[in-house]
Amino acid sequence: MMVKRKIIKERIPTPERPVEERLKGFMEVNLGYTFELAVQEAQRCLQCPYEYAPCIKGCPVHIDIPGFIAKLVEYKDEPDRAVKEALRVIWACNTLPATTGRVCPQEDQCEMNCVMGKVGDKVNIGKLERFVADYAREKGIDDELLGEMLPEIEKKEQRVAVIGAGPAGLTCAAELAKDGYHVTVFEALHKPGGVLVYGIPEFRLPNEVVEKELEKLKRLGVEIKVDHIVGKTVTIEELLNRYDAVFIGSGAGTPRLINAPGVNLNGIYTANEFLTRINLMNAYRFPEYDTPIKVGEKVIVIGAGNTAMDAARTARRLGAEVTIAYRRGEEDVTAREEEVEHAKEEGVKFEFFLNPIEFIGDESGRVKAVKFMKMRALEEKDAKGKRKIEPTGETVILEADTVVIAIGKTANRLIVNTPGLEVEGGVIKVDENLMTSIPGVFAGGDAIRGEATVILAMGDGRKAAKAIHEYLQKKAKESA
Ligand SMILES: Cc1cc2nc3c(=O)[nH]c(=O)nc-3n(C[C@H](O)[C@H](O)[C@H](O)COP(=O)(O)OP(=O)(O)OC[C@H]3O[C@@H](n4cnc5c(N)ncnc54)[C@H](O)[C@@H]3O)c2cc1C
Ligand code: SF4
């Protein structure tokens, strides 16, 4: 018999830190649900059947979303049990839910086709996922669940090397460790996490949350060797001699530059350098930390993706007046909706249809202004479905003592230049099993896609782990 349920149209809001408080530091902006609020939001889910639920189809790793939400409602009188059961469902597909719940562009993924959207607000899936992970971490429920899983792992002899400790590499490593393989991750930087720790700022994703989530992976038996640059400290060829398979998850960390006069003036940063200094090296707490950062009073950020939004909001927190200049229109902004809203609330200004053509310096060699060509949109669309743009011939000069360039990134050159590794359009070429042109070497994440999303990188990590498992089983049979 169909149970008649009350439809709750409006989303239960998550508390947020007020703007004045946010601008004083790097504390997390969104404060997340309490158990009571999470249950209220969970009760809005219509519980579409598993085979049909559009949210599951929209999530790149197909988490059983109605399934985990149902546990919060079913055990609403036993919060710890509700969270443990919900986490069990999430972990079946996603090992970093505190991270994805915070940074996934849910509006384009799981929440995109949520049926509730037809009668009211879509269910707040990301914040519910984050709640489950945060509550479990705070109460040690995640450790308890992990403790139950560990004895079930049957150890295998074969060894796998993973290059890069970002979401792709770490997910691949975790899945292989769950299958019993010896996994060693080689990371170039002194901390694991990839963009999660050096790119995405604390006010969106606290490093502590990532660190705690990564501890779980270490408990699974994954060994992480930091300060190891593959291509320099060790080559892929050497890894292939010592390991039975290799996974490349080295991301797309090489910034794209603007080929315009004056681009080397002082005060011009790539977003990568700017955000690394702040997030990884804690330069905003200089001189308590050694790395300095110099930000003036007027900052221009060029670009309108997540990276640009993060750089702009970071500069606001360092006290600057900030303008985002984008060569296309507002409808083409690629950053997450929530981040654009937060940036606007925090006083970041937006200028559209401006393309930089010259950086103008003062007598000491520091940038003082940027000259832009005004652009206009055409009706015709490009391959990515965006309206094409063309110069109008009219220019405009905006003053700035600091410029941050955030126009995208390409794959790491050291890896891409590996002999025998086929590359297409700046990214590593793989087959349908994510195997590269070198047998036994697999790849995923931004290294094969260019800059994409955390959950797509994690999805690749999972898929590659499965393919590596099959490859190694076949290899073991052949040598038996
Ligand atoms: C500022 C910023 C904000 C973003 N915001 C979002 C967001 O809100 N939501 C979202 O879904 N996505 C976001 N993204 C994109 C997302 O972070 C990436 O798609 C994701 O991190 C890709 O994961 P990955 O594991 O492929 O690579 P990465 O996270 O880049 O990790 C690669 C790792 O490999 C290491 N490495 C590189 N070369 C070598 C080498 N030769 N030897 C050893 N190690 C090496 C790197 O140091 C790094 O740790 C953002 C990206 C940036 C830059
Ligand atoms: S992993 Fe991302 S896309 Fe999938 S359910 Fe969670 S928030 Fe949504």
Image (cartoon, helix red, strand yellow):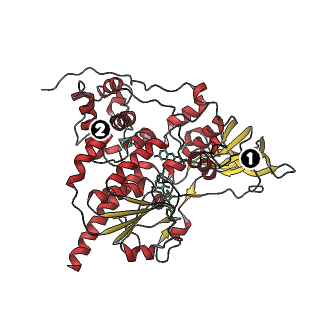
Q: Is residue 104 visible?
A: no
Identify residue type, mark 1: Phe
- Image quadrant for the C terminus? bottom left
Q: Residue at x 26, y 61 (%)?
A: 180
Earlier in the chain: of badge 1 and badge 2, it is: 2
- Given the current orientation, which residue lies at the most extreme left position? 1
Q: Quadrant of residue 240?
A: bottom left
Q: Position of residue 177 (x, y in %)?
A: 30, 58
Q: Quadrant of the N terminus?
A: top left
Q: Position of residue 112 (x, y in %)?
A: 39, 38
Q: Secondary structure at mark 1?
A: strand
| 19 w.r.t. 443: above or below | above
Q: Which residue is the site of mark 1?
A: 372
Q: Of circles 1 and 2, which is in front?
A: 2
Could you say where residue 21 lies in the image, as x and y percent from the top left? 58, 26
Lateral position of residue 92 relative to residue 247, left or right = left
Q: Amino acid at mark 2?
A: Ile
The residue carrying mark 2 is: 141
Q: Are marks 1 and 2 in contact (CB under 8 Å)?
A: no
Q: Is mark 2 within 8 Å of ligand 2?
A: no
105 above or below 123? below
In-front residue for pair 17/388: 17
Count how many numbered circles sit on residues in the image.
2
- Residue 451 left/right relative to 132: right
Residue appearing at x 21%, y 75% in the figure = 477
Quarter containing ligand 2?
top left
